[in-house]
Image (cartoon, helix red, strand yellow):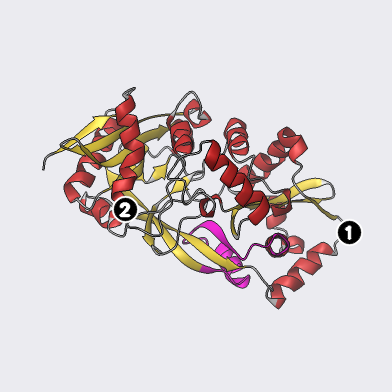
Amino acid sequence: MPVQVRELGSDKRRRRDFLDVVDTIYRGDPAYVRPLDMEITGKLDPSKNPFFQHAEGSAWVAYQGDRPVGRITAQIDHEHLRLHKDEAGFFGYLDTIEDAEVAAALLDEAAAWLKSRGMKKIRGPYSLSINEELGCLVDGFSFPPMIMMPHHRPYQAGLIERAGFAKLKDFYAWKYEVGEVPVRAQRAHDEIEALPEISVRLVDPKNVARELDVIIDIFNDAWSDNWGFVPATKTELEKAAKDLELLLMPELTRIVCIDGEPAAVAVGLPNLNELIDDFEGKLGPLQIAKLLYRLKVRGPRSGRLYILGIKKKWRNARKYAGLSAYLYVEMNRAAHLLGLRSGELSWTVEDNAPINVGIKLMGGRVYKTYRVFERALG
């Protein structure tokens, strides 16, 4: 059947189709957890998402007849272009039925939109930026997605490749079982803890503005050499903090100072997806009551290490080489006390050997792989 691709614009029916098409695509997939509708609509709304203070974008739904069969976004991050000067635009939120014509039509529509605005490459999936959901799942399909991580059908990557895209970079998600830590890691932790200039505290939820300044300063310094890095803005972190306010557990945070100067940070989040897997994207009064009960009474059983960063001036100092192990051990201890059984450390770049070796030292194992693809816009 012929495929028609229609831009969302202000059409309310089309916007509903953009959200609901996943019910068709992922029907029967036991690992899939539908994201909350309000989360996606908030991300796509330029008036609500500070990403669009330095970006522009659009979104489409694919139809066969009147039946929605896929979706996609295209976006240009001007902050990325300023830093990397690579004339690359991005696609994201790509979900399709198993049909090469549908996938090609959506990707071609996104490519045409980007090309008309001067881009020379189309790269993705980025939903919407490198600091949010990244990549197409290519391995680990039997595991449900962790909070703020994507999930795809096994055929999706193949459809992207058939549309003329090639692998650009792989990213790893690591599974970590909470429990005893390796002796070597514990020794590194204890050596850092014994240093008189080291102090550590939890993130203070009563002083969010101050804490965000600390976190963004460390994050942007620590991650600045990472592949594709784009600094997070304060308004973006403020929105993330507001969105995650209900989930923030100070016990799953650490800010390490050296001689009083913030030097490293770790922020873990309880896994929202295990608490909303029966919500079908909705968050009404009944779902809110269920979420509060599950969060406060039953408690989550898994979590994600969302941010871990060490400022370069300290990371490269031999004396403080054990800082990453220190943070891993601290987060393991906190997770254990909270009753968490497992965690995900994500994501890391495939060729970031120092980070990947450090996670292996802690007993982590790669259990999911996400892939970013690219195609020239010729």
Residue lying farthest left? 1
| Identity of the residue drawn at 57% across and 69% down | 364
Image quarter for residue 207?
A: top right
| Identity of the residue drawn at 70% across and 71% down | 185
Viewer can see residue 8:
no
Q: Nearer the viewer, residue 37 or 193?
A: 37
Q: Nearer the viewer, residue 207 or 231?
A: 207
Vertical placement of 193 versus 18: above or below?
Answer: below
* The C terminus - image quarter: top left
Where disc 2 sits, the SS reads loop
Q: How many marks on residues?
A: 2
Q: Start and end of the magenta stretch?
A: 336-365
Residue 138, percent from left and from top: 36, 60
Vertical placement of 223 versus 141: above or below?
Answer: above
Where disc 1 sits, the SS reads loop
Q: Nearer the viewer, residue 375 or 133?
A: 133
User: 10 Å neighbourhood of mark 1: few (<14), some, or many (≥20)?
Assistant: few
Viewer can see residue 210:
yes
Q: Earlier in the sequence, mark 1 or mark 2?
A: 2
Q: Is residue 363 located in the magenta-colored stretch of the structure?
A: yes
Residue linked to disc 1? 196
Q: Is residue 32 located in the magenta-colored stretch of the structure?
A: no
Residue linked to disc 2? 27
